[in-house]
Image: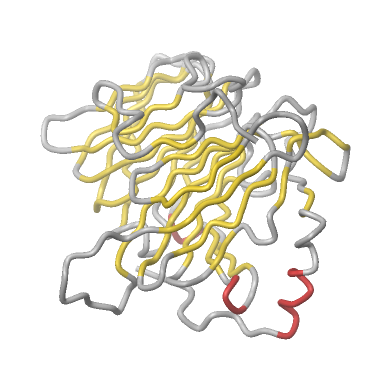
Amino acid sequence: MSSPNKWYFRKGELKSAVWEVHVDANNPPAKPWASTGIRVGKLSSGVFLELPADNNERLIFPLEGEKISVQYLLSNSGEIHTQVLRGRKSVFHGPSDLLYLPINTRASVSGLGRVLVSESPAKNSKPVKYMPKEDVPVELRGAGRETRQVHNFGLPDVLDADRMIAVEVIVPAGNWSGSPAHKHDTYVPGKESNLEEIYYFESAVSRGLETPVSSNPFGIFRGISADNRPYDVNEEIHSGDVVLVPYGWHGPAAAGPGYDLYFFNVMAGPDPDREWNLTDHPDQAWIRKSWETQKTDSRLPYKA
């Protein structure tokens, strides 16, 4: 089912001023879009990435780089606070430190490396939360070729946020994530949530492999409508690409042979409850049962 909206964006298509990627719910690249945003920026000497005090709660962490500094000013405080975030060699080298900032918080980010900021418009101010990388919950989800590594730092039972739910996922070469395909676009209390979602991707030659020739790391992403609302994404994905999921079935996301895949997800929606409940595609729900007889992929977990 085709759509007049564009839901897949190649690297550079969402560039805005100093940001390599900038999706803002207040100025969305497609409609309907109202609950999530993302910024990706590169830091170097003398470069400061500024975040305004507005109605967005935010989660900030290094994609790569050793140390990134965040100075922030809460609306109810006249004091400027500083938090240093320890990073990692790349997104394929375990978790990094994170910082959650509530609404009405101005911040300035500096250092060396690349940083990701996820956003969600919110109403209630929650406490600032610093999470060291050692405290990030790491889950090996699935089994066999559906094994992936999930950093569950932004789940409702881990992070006290108002609207935002966020995770990052590592899919080793040849594996599949988001399988079975699923949806969360209808509010059914306790069964399914209504959450729009952003995917930000990176890909690289798989850890432990060397290529004697030039390469172009890639993965595959699939999304399709679950009702009469148009949504259809079937793309080869590369580092810096973004996919928006306003509704509908989405998954799998597959890592190409020889290439590891990373993606960050941020989700939020209008439900009265901050929960991540989903419905599996009826043709694929059986896949979960098959994991019971398969082993976890021995290549995971990826650590520093």
Name the quadrant of the N terminus.
top right
Q: Percent position (x, y) of residue 27?
A: 47, 15
Of residues 177 and 139, which is closer to you in this image? Answer: 177
- Figure coloring: secondary structure
Q: Quadrant of residue 288?
A: bottom right
Q: How many marks?
A: 0
The residue sitting at the left extreme is 45
Q: Is residue 80 left or right of residue 158?
A: left
Please, is residue 142 above or below residue 62 in the view? below
Q: Quadrant of residue 177?
A: bottom right
Q: Is residue 29 left or right of residue 283?
A: left
The residue sitting at the front extreme is 1
**Residue at x 40%, y 72% (from the top left corner):** 257
Q: Percent position (x, y) of residue 61?
A: 39, 43
Q: Percent position (x, y) of residue 222?
A: 57, 50
Please, is residue 75 above or below residue 13 in the view? above
**Residue at x 53%, y 47% (from the top left corner):** 234
Of residues 154 and 279, which is closer to you in this image? Answer: 279
Of residues 230 and 210, which is closer to you in this image? Answer: 230
Q: Quadrant of residue 268?
A: top right
**Residue at x 36%, y 29% (from the top left corner):** 14
**Residue at x 43%, y 56% (from the top left corner):** 262
Please, is residue 120 above or below residue 193 in the view? above
Name the quadrant of the C terminus.
bottom left
Of residues 45 and 280, which is closer to you in this image? Answer: 280
Q: Percent position (x, y) of residue 139?
A: 59, 66
